[in-house]
Amino acid sequence: MIDADRRTHWENVYQTRGETEVSWFEDSPVISLDLIRATVVRPDAAVIDIGGGASRLTDALLNAGFSSLTVLDLSEKALEVAKTRLGERAACVKWIAADVTVWQPPDTYDVWHDRATFHFLTDPSDRAAYADRVSQAVRPGGHVIIGTFAPDGPERCSGLPVIRHDAASLQAVLGPSFTLIESRGHAHRTPMGATQQFQFSRFRRLD
């Protein structure tokens, strides 16, 4: 099931803007790769990228030898952009068009990665639903990496309000089953030349 309003918004974004014309575009997702490497999971670990859409993280993980990748996004158009770019390699990835707040995880994962999805969840019930999906999907000992706008980051993105976070506010949502391993600040330079302050936090699920 997909929230119709949210889906319509993001389909329109990817129908009307090119891959490199959105503010969150990264040619090389360096900090995400660093944090995934920091988990020291094996290349055959199951990794899911929430809101991955047209992100080039999938390309980079395939290049690094990861072989069990899943990408979830609201926008089918965004996923099609990534599939087209990857060509034959797209068949090596599982693609899911879904709203993470209502999605029912069919599998479990060693790494849950989310860059810039969680901060769009302005309703507390959506954040609670997200945390419930994390608890269902992440294996004991697994890792959760969430990147959001930092407390001094933008208050809106793509015409929508956001909730800015730090590691403590993310910990409060995820709950005591997850322990914070590290948090990093990151200044993202948009294709339009603006700088946006992000924070990335990495948690580990307790055994």
Image (spheres, rainbow, N blue to C red):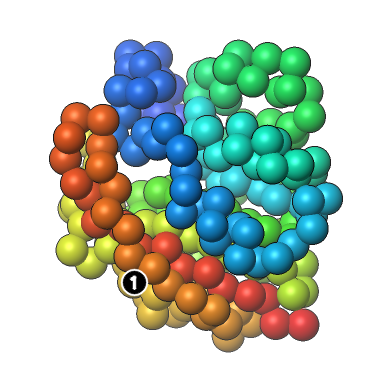
Residue 1 shows in this picture: no
State the residue at coordinates (17%, 35%): 193
The front one of 154 and 121 is 154
Residue 22 vertical placement versus 165 (above, below): above
Question: Horizontal and vertical percent for residue 200?
Answer: 42, 63
The front one of 169 and 32 is 32
Q: Residue furthest bottom?
A: 176
Q: Quadrant of the C terminus?
A: bottom right
Residue 68 vertical placement versus 207 (above, below): above
State the residue at coordinates (64%, 20%): 86
Quarter of image, res 9: top left
Label 1 element class: loop
Q: Quadrant of the N terminus?
A: top right
The front one of 144 and 160 is 144
Quarter of image, res 42: bottom right
Question: Horizontal and vertical percent for residue 179?
Answer: 57, 82
Amino acid identity at mark 1: Asp
- For mark 1, what is the residue? 166
Question: Horizontal and vertical percent for residue 18?
Answer: 36, 16
State the residue at coordinates (37%, 57%): 148
